[in-house]
Each structure stands twice: as C-alpha cells, then as structure tokens.
Image (tube, grey):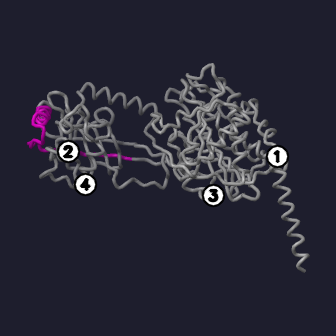
Amino acid sequence: MKKSTNYPLALVLFANLISLGAFAQANPVPYAYTIKAEDLKKHLTFIASDSLKGRNTGSAEQKVAANYIADHFKKSGLAPVNGSYFQKVDLVNRSWSKVALSIKGKAYEYLGHFMANALVPVAANSKLPVVFAGYGVQQAGFADYDKLSAKGKYVLAFEGEAKDAQGNYVLSGTKDPSVFGKGDGWKEKLKRSQALGAKGLILISDKSEKDFGNQLRQRQVMMQRFGNERMVFADVAASPNEAPVLTISSAMAAEILGTTEADLLAYKASVAAAKKSVPAKFKALPITLTIERTEKPVDTYNVVGYLEGTDKKDEVVILTAHYDHIGISFDGKINNGANDDGSGTVTVMELAEAFGQAAAEGKRPRRSILFMTVTGEEKGLLGSEWYSNHPLFPLANTVCDLNTDMTGRYDEEHMGKPDYIYEIGSDKLSSSLREILVDQNKKHVGLELDFRFNDPNDPNRFYYRSDHYNFAKHGIPVAFFFNGVHDDYHQPGDDVEKIEFDQVQKVGRLVFYMAWEISNREERLKVDSNKP
C-alpha cells in the first residue's frame, strides 16, 4: 500500500523535474528571433493605416484595431481571461453643452466675454448673489474676508495679488509671488472662499481689455482643436470641493459692481498703495448663471491575452503598450500614431507570438504572462489605471510591468547614432530588474541604454507619463522603453513610412529576453528600492 502510493507520486515529481530541467536548458534565442522587422511592419501597416483614423479612444476604428490585436493573440495560442480577450473600461465623455451668464438681463458669451478655470453644473438660470472680496486674500495685512458674508454666494475677487510701485509683490516683498499670485493661485482663493461657505469664485482678470480679448481668442482656438469633452471613469462623481471658477474682464466686473471700470481700477491701485485691504463701497449685483453638462458612454476596451505558466503560474508578468492615439485633428488631418504607440502595440503582438510558439514547443514559462494593449493612454493613462483598480489578476501576484511606448524613431540627439533606447524606472522599485535589463542587453542585443530620463529631476517627467506608472504607484516594479520625442510627436506626420523597424525589432527582442528571464528565474523580482 505504502509503496504503491509513493510510486506514482515519485513519477509525477520526476516528470516535473525533467520538465523544469529541460526548460532550464531551453535556448530563448530562436524565439526572440521570431520577432522580425518585416512582421512588425506588416502589423503596423494596418494598425497605423488611414482607414483606422488615428484610433481615437472609443471610436469605431479603435474597436477594429482591438479586434485585430485580439485575433492575433488567439492565433498565437494565448487564452482569453474570464472568457474574453477584452476588458471593458467604463468611461464616459463629459462635455459642457451650455455655459451662459447674464447681469441685469444682459447676456455675456462664454469664451467671447468670459472664460472658466473650472466648471461644475449649475441649474439653468440660477440667480446667484455675489460679494466683492478685493483680492480674496486672508494673510498678513490682507483681511479681505473680515466682516464679509460669503455663505451661499459667489465671491468676486481680483486675479493674482497686489504689487507695489517697484513691481514687487506686496505679500512676499520680492519679485516672486506668494501662493496667491502663482498660476494656480485661484485654487488657494477658492479654498478660502469655500471655507466661508462660498458656492463659486469669479476672478477679475489682471490683463487689459485687449490682452484679455486675445486670451479668450486663444481659448477659442484650443476649444476648436481639442473640443470641450473630458473622458473620465463613469463611476467618478464630482468632488465636493469642486465649484465654478470664472474669469471676467474688469469692464464686466464693473457691471456687476455697479461702477465704472476706471473707478474699479482706481480702487485696485489704492490697495496696492496701501499694501493692505481697503474697504470698498461697491455693492455687487446678482448674476444669472447656467452651466449644463452632457455625458455620453464610451465603448472601449483593454485587449488582453493570457499565457499560463507552469510551477509558478500564480505569479504574473505583464507586458503592455497602448493602442489608442489622438484620432483626427480639428482640420481633418489623421494622426496615425505609428510610433505613438503603434510601435509598442505591434511589439506586444510579436512578443505574444514568440512566447506562444515557445509554449507550443514545450517551453512554457514558469510564471504566467499577461499581454495587454491598453486604451485611453492619450486621455490620461485611463486604461492602465482602470486595470490597476480592477485587476484581472491580483496586484499582489503581479511581478512587474514591462511597457513599450514609442520605440520606432530617433530623437534629434541620436540622428545618425541608432541602436539606443531610453529606459525609465527599472531601478526605482527593484534593484534586480535593472540588473536583468543590463545583463540581457549585454548578452543578446547590445543597445545603448540611456537612463537620463530616469533622473527624478527630469523636467519632462516621462516616468509619470505612460502606462507603467499605474503599476509602479502600486509598488510593482516597472521598466519603460522609449525613443524620445521627435518632430512628428502627436502630429499627422507620425506615419509608418518613418518607422525604423530594425530599431523596433531590437527593443522588442530585449523586452523578450527580459520577460523570459523574469518569468523563469527561481526567485521573484525583489521589491527592495524606493527611489523617486
């Protein structure tokens, strides 16, 4: 009995040892070499074709790309997850359909007479009381809210902060503004007004009527180019701290205050001269305001393919790129996004095929691998954020994310000097991930690894600007591969004809070798760093 029970167990253990021993001797090179420039080009010629119209998030053409990627995953031998190659990302497009303001029945046009720093829905034709608060500052000699009732009202205040005759900011006494005078100083003013119960903030522009008019026209151009839609998660409600913040001209402010623009500007000058709050005799009229918002569901998905591992299958390595782009410009030109991030998308597709072929030939990785092309990166890393909040596999079991975003062009500094790649993030959470990168590159590929953008003081902040970051912020080691910015970045000129497919091939092979090593080594990657 005892002998017969142990005999089959011994056979199973022996078989497993043979299997793992065989894998330990497996040569990754033949599978890496299935990642070929001609195959990458074939896929990218479709993904970045005019017929897909720039793969804008939620567009019908993006869905065509998603189906193409999913079909390739299936042909490569990858399995669906929870019965599907698609993870629905629950997004909506929110846009402002009507923003209207009137004073004593006189209508003012949005982006014609005023603009907004922040918009929040306001019921149609709401009559709202207004109170004038000078600069809206409660600090040092400024006590703009003393003896002022702001509860339930909109606070009207000058933009920025007072300057003296020498051009110094009164609060700081230098050429450097205080927190109230910086570009986002309005947020501080809003906080202080809301603390007193205010429902909104109206800023009086510090620009001349002419310059403010030019600013409004610039906003109009931006609105025409990018629209007023904002893509957000459907389940994200407005923050209780959100409130309308409008910016108006001094002439329009004078209308609200029942005075002249000259008297208003004279009062403003008296505050600067006094270097403190000055009582105002203005009595503000109420405004009538309408801010209407529409919401439209977005039909978009992350595309996923799963390759189950063997003895360490509960641990998952993730390989990502984003397959969306910015679609059609306001002037009708198609932004095909061949490099951004068609190059990364087809790399993930070829990685799937390489690992799928290895698995079919008995070289299945020890750890599982999730191949994922994500949506909504161009709208704010939304697809990868959705995944990190709704993971298909526990984040605690996620070993790392290797992310490719723009790997098929050269930046200006490397023209004539190919065979490089910028890598960002591999040492920030794990010392062993950087070691694997350097070792596998030295053994197999020989690219120049440029780490300059890994510097926490990099003003471009690339580390925070692609999908790997939504894994890193959960403590999951990441490596981000990127060729730098070129003249066609987010322009109609980012086309297939300009892609250096040999470069994409080399980066793809490097990611393959890294993923092969990470998914098959005995020890899981260490999470032993905490670098900014």
Q: Contact (CB < 8 A) between labels 1 and 4?
A: no
| Residue that carries the numbered disc 3 in the rendered image | 397
Residue 340 appears in the picture as rendered: no
- For label 1, count other residues whose C-alpha is less than 10 Å away and answer few (under 14), some (14-19) or many (20+): few
Dot 3 lies on which element?
helix
Dot 2 crowding, Cα within 10 Å, few <14, some 14–19, many 20+: many
Asked which secondary structure carries label 1, the reply is: loop
Could you tell me the amino acid type at mark 1? Ala
* 367 relative position to 265: left or right: right
Q: Magenta stretch containing residue 438, yes or no?
A: no
Q: Which residue is mark 2?
A: 137
Measure the C-alpha gap from mark 1 to mark 4.
Answer: 66 Å
- Mark 2 or mark 4: whose residue is earlier in sequence: 2
Mark found first going from the N terminus, 1 or 4: 1
Real-space Cα distance between discs 1 and 2?
Answer: 69 Å
Q: Residues within 10 Å of mark 4 (few under 14, many from 20)?
A: few
Residue under label 1:
26
Q: Outermost residue toward the bottom?
A: 1
Of tags 4 and 3, the one toward the viewer is: 3
